[in-house]
Amino acid sequence: MQRDEYLHLDQANHLAWGYISIPPMTAWISYLIKLLGNGVFWVKFFPALFGALTIVVVWKAIEELNDNLFALILGATGVLFSALLRLNTLYQPNSLDVLCWTTLYFVVIKYINTQKPKWLYVGAIVFVIGFLNKYNIVFLLIGLFPAILMTNQREVLAKKQLYRAMLLGLLLILPNLLWQYLNGFPVIHHLNELAETQLVNVDTWGFLKSQLLFYVGSLFVIMAALYALLFHKPFSEYKAFFWAIIFTLAVFVYFKAKDYYAIGLYPIYIAFGSAFLANLLKNGWKRYLQPVAIAIPVLFFIPMYNFAFPNKSPEYIVKHEKRYKELGMLRWEDGKDHALPQDYADMLGWKELAYKVDTVYSKLPESDKTLVLCDNYGQAGAINYYTNNKIKAVSFNADYINWFNLDQQYDHLIRVKTYTGKDSELEETSPYFQTSFVSDSITNPFAREYRTAIFTFIGAKVDINKRIREEIDETKKHR
């Protein structure tokens, strides 16, 4: 599993209406996974399910636009054989985010076709689910609102049912907004931290290039959709969708968003494009182009599968470094190239870390009085997931800063320290303990956690709990 997945699974043990890192929906799903046994199968089941449901929604959207078997197959094929297949291998909010984007756009189509107010309320519910999963869905509304203003669909703004639906949505997300308020709006700190450490490395060309690659096999379908939204008369009522994609991408570029934030934007355009192409290729010799159109996403996907999926060994990737580098896959959030793609490096070393910490923990004379303190959420989450000794590792990083159990007095410390090129942990911490030594380290050279060290400190000379409280207060003060 990948670094983020361990944090999300651990959130099931700390249910709340909000978290520093993400809204609460993922934690609720994690709780369901916990009830189902917390196995890897169920961890991977839910993103796969959301991906499958995205195909279903695209299928239903095409039925609304042009109930043609070729259009349905082309749309489903285009969505399946895309970057979504990789996205949906990871248990992160992104899979449900794409599903919610696609579903909300589908609801807009349904409302345009029927003018029934019930779809406004359905749209509000979909937005709430999306918002409680990932705040990213707000960008959908930011892009859609001016697009609606530019078309005849602006008439919906005079409907009182719209504002009732908006009020319903506000009431449903209010608990999360209150949580943010009571906790000092950590989402703002999180966004500022992203901007300083990751988004600063995002460049406009790299963002736009990625948009072309996400659905490279269906790019002709998306382009057909944009043409049809402007010039295909049966699609004239949907012209707001043409402007929506432009405004939404412009907002993402302006805010220097990560490229995958926009990945949920395109499935509905594959639906539009498929419906239009089915009409274009339905007669005469053009019918023979239908199987070609269906084959294109599959053929483009084959090389993508060979390089963009974690199905090769680290040794293979290192050996073929040039190809991966040309595709930009070795570039991490720090803006530098590394030996492996970041997601792949984030999948390695966790079992080794958990096993070694478990071994150290079990040998201590008073393990119940031992605090396991990590540098980051990946370390803490992996230890807590794989532990056989019921370890509750914590960190000052991400949500773990709120999960310290300071009702328990600690006399010993296991410190998991990320390698930074210089080792001063023993020198800095050993004066506060009777015994100090390096217990072990991560030896997998391909892991992002390579050389992460495990320090053991026994017999505290100071009040550990007091020092921890001071550190927590200091960390929160700067957020």
Image (spheres, rainbow, N blue to C red):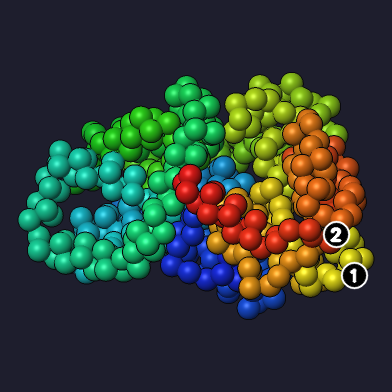
The three-letter amino acid code for the residue at tag 1 is: Pro
Q: Earlier in the sequence, mark 1 or mark 2?
A: 1
The residue where tag 1 is placed is: 365
Q: Residue at x 21, y 62 (%)?
A: 166
Q: Residue at x 63, y 60 (%)?
A: 466
Numbered label tally: 2
From this viewpoint, which residue is outermost toward the front?
Answer: 461
The residue where tag 2 is placed is: 458
User: Closest to the observer: 322 or 369?
Assistant: 369
The three-letter amino acid code for the residue at tag 2 is: Ile
Q: Position of residue 395 (x, y in %)?
A: 65, 54
Asked if 423 appears above or below 145 in the picture, the reply is above
From this viewpoint, which residue is outermost toward the left?
Answer: 158
| Residue 281 makes an appearance in the image | no
| Residue 11 makes an appearance in the image | yes
Mark 1 and mark 2 residues within 8 Å of each other at the beta carbon: yes
Q: Position of residue 365 (x, y in %)?
A: 90, 70
User: Would residue 410 be found to the left or right of residue 212 on screen?
Assistant: right
User: Would residue 268 be found to the left or right of residue 441 on screen?
Assistant: left
Q: Secondary structure at mark 2?
A: strand
Callout 2 environment at 10 Å: few (<14), some (14 to 19), or many (20+)?
many
User: Would residue 223 be found to the left or right of residue 8 on screen?
Assistant: left
Q: Residue at x 79, y 72 (%)?
A: 368
User: Would residue 65 be found to the left or right of residue 188 on screen?
Assistant: left
Q: Position of residue 467 (x, y in %)?
A: 65, 56
User: Closest to the observer: 43 or 103?
Assistant: 43
From this viewpoint, which residue is outermost toward the bottom?
Answer: 35
Q: Residue at x 90, y 49 (%)?
A: 437
Q: Quadrant of the N terminus?
A: bottom right
Asked if 60 appears above or below 235 in the picture, the reply is below
Q: Marks 1/2: CA distance? A: 9 Å
